[in-house]
Image (cartoon, rainbow, N blue to C red):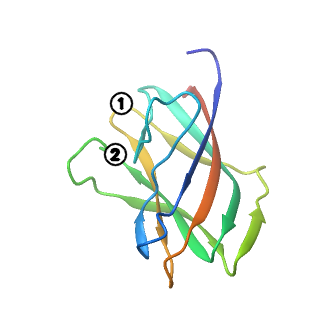
Amino acid sequence: MSESELITLFGQTNGTNTTGTVSLNSDILYQSVNAIVIPQGMKAKIYVTEISGAAVSFTVNYSTNILATSPTLVSVASYNLASAGQLMLDIRRPIILRSRTGQEGFNITWSQSTAAVSNITIVVEFTPDY
């Protein structure tokens, strides 16, 4: 991995449930994933750039062992789209998550009062943690 690597990830709610975990996709992934593992010795700078569709609340969750069968998740940020539409977010202040063992990672969950399709786009920058 180079000094810094940027990855755009996108996902959406499934339109049938009012809560769940976002399946993330990217041009560099072979299939969608429910969590992103941060490589050992790296940090992930997460920029949530856009939320669109129906009203929704997206939450970024961190775990020190995202690979566990039932990882312990800590909510680190929440983003709300109060009504149907599009929300473009200021990306000057990222969420920064570090990995010391290579098992740390994050996922994104959603919550809606009425099941509908909503979208999220994030940019993750992986950099060495020194």
Point out residue 9 in the picture as x, y percentages from the top left corner.
59, 42
| Callout 1 crowding tier (Cα within 10 Å): few <14, some 14–19, many ≥20 | some
Q: Residue at x 50, y 28 (%)?
A: 42
Element type where label 2 sits in the image: loop
Q: Amino acid at mark 2?
A: Thr
Q: Residue at left 37%, top 40%?
A: 104
Q: Residue at x 44, y 51 (%)?
A: 107
Taking 64 as reference, is 42 left or right? right
Of residues 47 and 114, the one drawn nearer to the viewer in this rendering:
114
Say the numbered circle drawn on residue 64: 2
Looking at the image, the residue that sits furthest to the bottom is 113
Task: Reply above or below: 45 against 61.
Answer: above
Q: CA distance from mark 2 to mark 1?
A: 9 Å
Residue most extreme to the front? 16
The picture places residue 20, in percent across and down from the top left corner, at 40, 65
Q: Quadrant of residue 65?
A: top left
| Kind of residue at badge 1 | Gly
Q: Are marks 2 and 1 in contact (CB under 8 Å)?
A: no
Which labelled disc corresponds to residue 102?
1
Viewport quadrant of the N terminus: top right
Residue drawn at the location 43% of the way across and 35% of the way down: 31
For the C terminus, which image quadrant?
A: top right
| SS at circle 1 | loop
Is 84 situated above or below 12?
below
Specify which label sits upstream in the sequence, 2 or 1.
Answer: 2
